Amino acid sequence: MATSSTPPFLASDQSLSPTPSTIDVRGIVRRHGAVLAVDQVSFQVRRGEFFSLLGPSGAGKTSVLRMLAGFEDPDEGDLLIDGRSMLGVPPNRRPVNLVFQSYALFPHLTVFDNVAFGLKMRRVASTLIEAQVRQALTMVKLFGKEARRPAQLSGGEQQRVALARALVNKPAVVLLDEPLAALDQQLRQAMQVELKSIQQQAGLTCVCVTHHQEEAMMMSDRIAVMHQGRMWQVGSPREVYERPCNLFVSRFLGVSNELPGRIGAPIGEDRLFQPIDADQPPLTVRTLTSEQAGRPATLSLRPEQLRMARERPATSGPVLSGRIEKVLFAGSDTKYLVRVGPERVWETRMTSDASLPSFAAGDPVFLHWSLPDGRLFFE
Amino acid sequence: MPDHDRASSQAPGRSSCRSCWLAAPGLLWMGLFFLAPLGLVFAISFASRGTYGGIVWEFTAANYLDLLHPLYGKILGQSLWYASLTTAICFVLGFPLAYVIARSPARWQPVLLLLVMLPFWTNFLVRTYAWMILLRQDGLANRFLMGLGVVDAPLELLYTPTAVVIGLVYSYLPFMVLPLYVAVERLDPLLVEAAWDLYASRWSVFTRVVVPLTMPGIVGGCVLVFIPSIGAFITPDLLGGARSMMIGNLIQHEYLVVRDWPLGSAVSFVLMAIVMAAVVLYYRHADRTAEALEGR
């Protein structure tokens, strides 16, 4: 179970497209001055799919979204929506609608007129507009607030209007730019569930930009992880979380407990791994490739893959000794920070269950995990 | 805006008026040199002219009724037309200019605004004389047009209504650009993108989103251009000649040439009424826009 860091041009999964894709992005490049904002990005989005572009700020994900919307054009590459190239097609002629991070609702128009804007611009008959706007407002649970102005609505309600304003047009793709970032934590979580259910109910194809990894994992069918203009990995949330292609993806998608070292001698089908910290004994690791002994690598584990014990466990699997440095109670979970080396602190979590043995700061403990869970990353 | 001002000036005023005396010199000045003469002019507008040009203090509304005469009606109509045309041209020229300035890099904006204001640093009379030289028979404008082969014979430009409107547009364009700049600068560029994304053409984006949201600036700019234009006096006098008389010239004519002070005063008050109407329109609109945007 090991992967070396894959070059970005191999990271996209072009092989997985049995149905015709709604979006087909082919090697787009976008420069902002001397900076490569988007560097050779390719991906496909299937009909009805919720696809997230996940990455830290400055990763180039917003540039990709703006190119899909038509506000920017790629310097190289091509971009197809429903099989049609979108190069040179202005935003008002593209079958996509963008939900802005700040919502960008028209302050001089009522909720009804905001939602009806796109239909009016396409000269839909007014009787149809009436019905479709009502349907969209019902879907986002804003029925009865048609006459309000955006300034009279709460943040959550404004978000719903922004969503209704896009989906009322039945676009081929709804583009979402950090759709929930402006909401407070509780509302955000409620809206994640709701947005997802609206998307499924209406069969929307969505491309969502976010820097919030948990949100991306909960809402997306597939996630594309971007960093420094490149797309590093594309896959289902479980794939990218459990089998990240490199350390960056591993760290960005959650806590990555790491231990650098070198590959050692074979033991049966497995290999020894000598941690760089001198006081730690060798561990066993599983690696698919017949790696050369002595090759530097980093072992990574997710907090939930670790188990913690007071006594050295009677297991042939890997064990690491340490000392609890901090206990952080977080309601249903308790987080433990365990020092496993002079410059190394690992994180693990346990359910805050009174019947389980409790640990306190300063306790010496053993961390162990099942052999296949340990992932190796090579430089 | 006005609501806000009222609220902030009222609160300390109600509790005490210890600093009221600070306003006294200003109030005294305004009272003596503005309010009192205005009252006097108002009184004169209801008096009648003596045989040799003096004022006979007999109450009469005849001066206002005289203004209904077609001759005065024509001058009034002409003034309204020139001022409206000037305002419209200033808007058409000023809006794109204001838009570009407001959307240019922040460090360039003060420089560009300064360039817009620059003509004001030259004496108004000098600038108007310059236009006389440009527009006369053998002036630069005619030589340029003939050089390009657009016209064969020199156009008659100076002493025409065209010259008056050119002069007025030239003088008051900055008054249009500045309020428009402020309004566009406040307009969220994302709203433009949102409209564009929602299938609006460039023109629809302008009429459905940009114009309604910059309306306070548009109305403000129009009022600021319209008011001095309708009262203009030097520009039509120097560039327009006798045929393009405006209200300002009529007032001057009545006071100084005909020496009919009562009629001149009546004309002044009609002009003031028009200006007041424009100002009221402006505040009404500003209030309504504020209400709409704040969702009251």
Image (spheres, coloured by chain):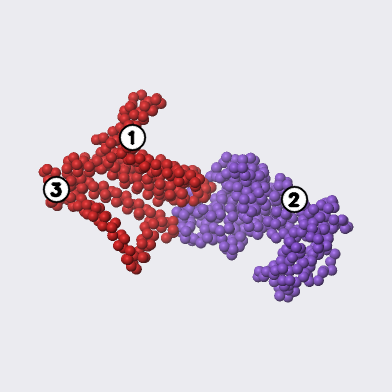
- The verdict on a common chain for dots 3 and 2 is no
**Residue lying at 34% horizontally and 32% vertically, measured from the top left:** B134
Horizontal side of A208 relative to A275 (left or right) equals left
Q: Position of residue A293 (x, y in %)?
A: 85, 52
Label 2 is placed on what type of residue? Answer: Ser
Task: Provide the letter of the chain coloured red.
Answer: B
- The verdict on a common chain for dots 1 and 2 is no
Q: Where is residue B260 in the image (x, y as percent from the top left)?
A: 17, 44
Label 3 is placed on what type of residue? Answer: Ile
| Residue A127 visible | no
Label 1 is placed on what type of residue? Answer: Ala
Q: Label 3: chain?
A: B
The image quadrant where one finds the N terminus of chain B is: bottom left
Residue at mark 2: A5
Q: What element carries label 3?
A: strand
Q: What element carries label 2?
A: loop
- Real-space CA distance between mark 3 and mark 2, rounded to the nearest whole angstrom: 100 Å
Q: Which of A86 and B19 is in front in this view?
A: B19
- Real-space CA distance between mark 1 and mark 2, rounded to the nearest whole angstrom: 74 Å
**Residue lying at 62% horizontally and 55% vertically, measured from the top left:** A210
Horizontal side of A258 relative to B239 (left or right) equals right
Give the quadrant of residue B26. bottom left
Residue at mark 1: B130
Residue at mark 3: B55
Give the quadrant of residue A248. bottom right
Dot 1 surroundings within 10 Å: few (below 14), some, or many (20 or more)?
few
Q: What element carries label 1?
A: helix
User: Which is in the foreground here, disc 1 or disc 2?
Assistant: 1
